[in-house]
Amino acid sequence: MRTEGDSWDITSGVGSTALFVAAGRAFASREPDPLASDPFAETFVRAAGPEWEDLLDGLVADHPLTDPGFGTGFQLYLAARTRYFDAFCDAAIESGIRQVVILAAGLDARAYRLSWPDDAVVYELDRAPVLDFKAKALAAAGGMSRARRREVAVDLREDWPRALRDGGFDPSRPTAWLAEGLLPYLPAAAQDRLFESIDALSCRDSRAAVEQTEMLSPAALEEMQSYADQNDHGRAEWVQLIYNEPRNEAAAWFADHGWDAERTEVDAYIRALGRTPPTPDPSASLVTSLISLVTATRS
Ligand SMILES: C[S@@+](CC[C@H](N)C(=O)[O-])C[C@H]1O[C@@H](n2cnc3c(N)ncnc32)[C@H](O)[C@@H]1O
């Protein structure tokens, strides 16, 4: 259960979700023709300790990420969303944007993976222990950022714009904002404040890419819980980490605030990439049909 001001590191609470999705990206990157490839994901996961190394080395018998009911579809969804946000960054750079803010960066390695012009600045926002883990893992692996990368340790439920500005962010320059895998971990009111801050800090030609998940129905929650009760690797604990409450829909919010917004259902995106979306399975807590991707541009 979440509480106001609760905290975490990379292996606990909400922080562990960054490790979980990085492990999913590591598996997805091993596919023969991956939709996206993130070689740094494996580096991060191995740095998290022997049990994570064992998972990558196929030595863990029972884990959601390798469970055919959940893992295969989850890896496909992660690869698709990685590709969507990668394409968003590439298009933003192509349009002349040189300032990028990754909200809840977790173990996002785009500053290291993508091709950035020399004058691009990438701000990575997350809680301090998550950023510390990431910096140590990258330093140990000898990773070199391809963009000017600035870490900003914040709680996104609080006054993060001040910390961002103190870190050198310039609101008079067009910005590309990324919110990937973040919204369900924010209360609905904090999501509204997040959108309001993006809006207030964005000049003309700024862009935002946002992943959003619809609220889980009581029946889906019950099904997940009963699956978790019967299986060691149930993901019911994930439900304890999210704020499953009604919230504003991102495309509508941005459109109402003068942005041009386009929403893509993740399953449609997977199909457009020539793959078959996972079969909805609430018991395995994988319902990609509830997930959509929104890109908004401030004209
Ligand atoms: C599922 S991970 C996604 C990480 C990354 N965006 C990705 O897609 O790989 C969720 C991330 O949100 C961060 N996060 C959630 N709530 C936050 C908050 N209130 N303040 C700062 N970071 C937060 C967590 O620390 C974690 O790194």
Image: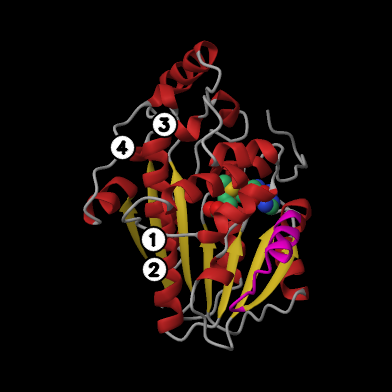
Alpha-carbon neighbours of circle 4 within 10 Å: few (<14), some, or many (≥20)? many
Q: Is residue 134 magenta?
A: yes
Which amino acid lies under the numbered mark 2 shown in the image of this protein?
Ala
Using the image as rendered, state which of residue 30 and residue 163 is in the foreground. Answer: 30
Disc 4 secondary structure class = loop
Disc 3 secondary structure class = loop
Residue identified by numbered label 1: 84
**Mark 3 or 1, closer to the camera:** 3
Which segment did they paint magenta? Answer: 133-147
- Quarter containing the C terminus: bottom left
Disc 1 secondary structure class = helix
Label 1, ligand 1: CB separation under 8 Å? no
The answer for how far apart the CA atoms under marks 3 and 1 are is 21 Å
Which amino acid lies under the numbered mark 4 shown in the image of this protein?
Pro
**Residue 87: image location, x then y, percent:** 39, 68
**Mark 3 or 2, closer to the camera:** 3
Mark 2 or mark 4: name the one nearer the start of the chain.
2
Alpha-carbon neighbours of circle 3 within 10 Å: few (<14), some, or many (≥20)? many
Residue identified by numbered label 3: 70
- Disc on res. 278: 4
- Can residue 19 be seen? yes
Using the image as rendered, state which of residue 206 and residue 241 is in the foreground. Answer: 241
Please tell me which residue is depicted at 66% across the width and 81% down the height of the picture. 170
- Disc on res. 87: 2
**Residue 139: image location, x then y, percent:** 73, 66
Mark 4 or mark 1: name the one nearer the start of the chain.
1
Q: Where is 132 relative to 266, above or below? A: below
Q: Where is 93 relative to 60, above or below? A: below
The answer for how far apart the CA atoms under marks 4 and 1 are is 17 Å
Label 3, ligand 1: CB separation under 8 Å? no
The answer for how far apart the CA atoms under marks 3 and 2 are is 26 Å
Name the colour scheme: secondary structure
